[in-house]
Image (cartoon, grey):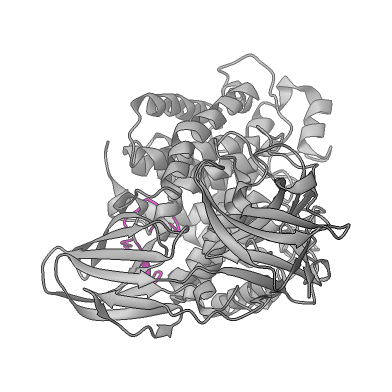
Amino acid sequence: MRWTSCFTAVICLAICSFCSGKSPLKKDYPYRPTPATKVELTDQFWRPRIETNRTATVPYSFGKCEETGRIENFKIAGGLSEKKWRGEFGFDDSDVSKIIEGAAYCWMTHPDDQQQKYVADLVSYYAAAQEDDGFLYTLWTARETIGEEAFNKVACRPEYTDRWSLINNAHQLYNLGHMFEAGVAHFEATGDRGLLDVCRRSADLVCKTFGLNGIALPPGHEEIEIGLVKLYRVTGEQRYLDQAKFFIEQRGRTSRSRDKVWGPYSQDHLPLVEQDKAVGHAVRAGYFYAAATDLAAIEGNTEYTAALDRLWRNVVETQMYITGGVGGTAEGEAFGAEYQLPNETAYCETCAQIAQCLWNHRLFLLHGDGKYLDVLERILYNGMLSGVSLDGKKFFYPNPLSSSGQHERSPWFGCSCCPSNLCRFIPSVPGFFYAVKDDNVYVNLYAAGTAQVEVQDSAVKIEQQTTYPRSGEVKLIVTPLQDGAKFALKLRIPGWARNEALPGGLYTFVEADHSPISLTVNSEAQSVEVDHGFTTINRVWNAGDEVALTLPMPVRRVLCSDKVAANRGRVALQRGPLVYCVEHPDVAGGKTHGLVLTDDAPLAIAEADELLSGVTTITGVAQSATGETVKFAAIPYYAWAHRGKGEMDVWLARGG
């Protein structure tokens, strides 16, 4: 296993979760994430999920790509198979790339020779499918194998008459973006340039083809911008960064190639610097904002930063579910109107939650404010995680907050962007935990495990001992490489521990909790003063210094702004970072829709180690729709839909 540019050239999760965080660029994110390869989680929450992704989800998803023809399509386009191109969408190519990316991340901590050989074959299929000038889109190249009528059906429009037409809907550039991300990850994991070279040939073609003197259009579905920035970071080629910026700058502008913009669905209604409301397809928007944040950091573009800050406030203040989900409407898989947050018809696409995680982490790396990590944590433990079953082989595309029994996870989808996205995202989670700026070490998230953090040209080992999110008790053992190291340890104090349900005020707690947050160093009490979401311990550190942080975790009742019609007169339950729901097996009669929870009804917690891979439940008494008193248990939202179809609710009617 060769550890190449991963440890020398590319910033971490904002661009790749497994890289060093050391950037060769003159200007970049001021806060450097500690790479996932330097963070080993040993906890009972994230480690099993990361292992399940590695041992189940990734190989399972490769198998589904074999079964559905996604892999064979590369062979067909490359003349290696005489079969007919098969699939429902031209963007099916991207699923294979995302799974390769996820597999490569897994190899960086768990080498797998057999899987690497398998992927080496896939890389050869990519190379064969690539046309001489670098074009790679299997549907177009293999179109003659399925005939004009079938091609038009898959391509969505009969006017798809040349390979770059329908750039707003055919996803040619979207496919390439995911391939670029896979190519960088594969190179970093193996040192093999095969897929990276395929990516560079395609990227060079894009740079020659799209521009003010060429095709002056942005892609309909953003993603290539992120991939181009990754290629720029690993190769140092300025043209890739320039091309990413060109695509960002073209949004909302007419050109010699078009006399009208495509509109809000593709965030193409206004130039970025004029946008102030999140609109359109929620996944496209998240990828767009993430890429623009990269440009803002690398170029120091304050206009981009101002626009992104406005858009973030709009999302969290008016368009975010309590689970961290976004995209309130199935129509267009899109953001709805402000405060349009229905529960049973909530879309909350899993891919949109992943995109929001990527964006919020970037915003933290840009600004250093814990509020972005509050949102990130909310999504990680709730809206994103509900997208995959505990066994890693069934998936949600939408993630509703209420069900009448019509919802269940699926083993795959015709449009299977969410399973393949989870393959690459889950192994990246450790890369969110730590960051460094100057002589400041940031502890962003909590889970048992160890990390080696680089600070001031030295190394510090940090060990966390905790059962978080079951408990808010966290012990950190700090061991600098050399005793007497002086630096500031910054511990994030989550908003939920400071009586802030979510930044922006869309959600509030019914009552404030005044339980003290305690902090000690070597058993000596420390004051907890919070600045931008962090409390700071600035001292000279010696091996074995112990920091103990206690974040109280009472059960909290949560209210939503009255501007959200769906939640008026309703209450939700939360404990620590986890949002809870009541599901049909946990209430008499299986009816959750009519439950009324009064403000004075006592609530308690119970450990259920044998339930749903181990959860902490919230137990209490409510009134049924017929006025009867019924006992109920609430489970973490991420764990619902594992025990058959039936009713489920996050928001219950609130009684006086």
Across and down, in percent, residue 250 comes to 66, 64
**Residue farthest to the front, as pictured:** 629
**Residue farthest to the left, as pictured:** 483
In the rendered view, tell whether residue 578 sits above or below residue 176.
below
Residue 575 or 204: which is nearer the viewer? 575
Instruction: State the image quarter where residue 563 is shown.
Output: bottom right
Residue at 60 percent of width and 70 percent of height: 556
Across and down, in percent, residue 135 comes to 58, 38
The reply to whether residue 16 is in sight is no
Across and down, in percent, residue 334 comes to 75, 58
The reply to whether residue 70 is in sight is yes
Residue at 80 percent of width and 52 percent of height: 330
Magenta-span inclusion, residue 612: no
Residue at 80 percent of width and 27 percent of height: 150
Quarter the N terminus occupies = top left
Q: Is residue 7 left or right of residue 590?
A: left
Q: Which residues are magenta?
A: 12-33
Residue 159 or 265: which is nearer the viewer? 265
Q: How many marks?
A: 0
In the rendered view, tell whether residue 138 sits above or below residue 553.
above
Magenta-span inclusion, residue 27: yes
Across and down, in percent, residue 470 comes to 47, 57
- Predominant SS of the magenta segment: loop
**Residue farthest to the top, as pictured:** 82
Quarter the C terminus occupies = bottom right
Residue at 47 percent of width and 76 percent of height: 369
Residue 227 or 331: which is nearer the viewer? 331
Q: Is residue 75 left or right of residue 113?
A: right
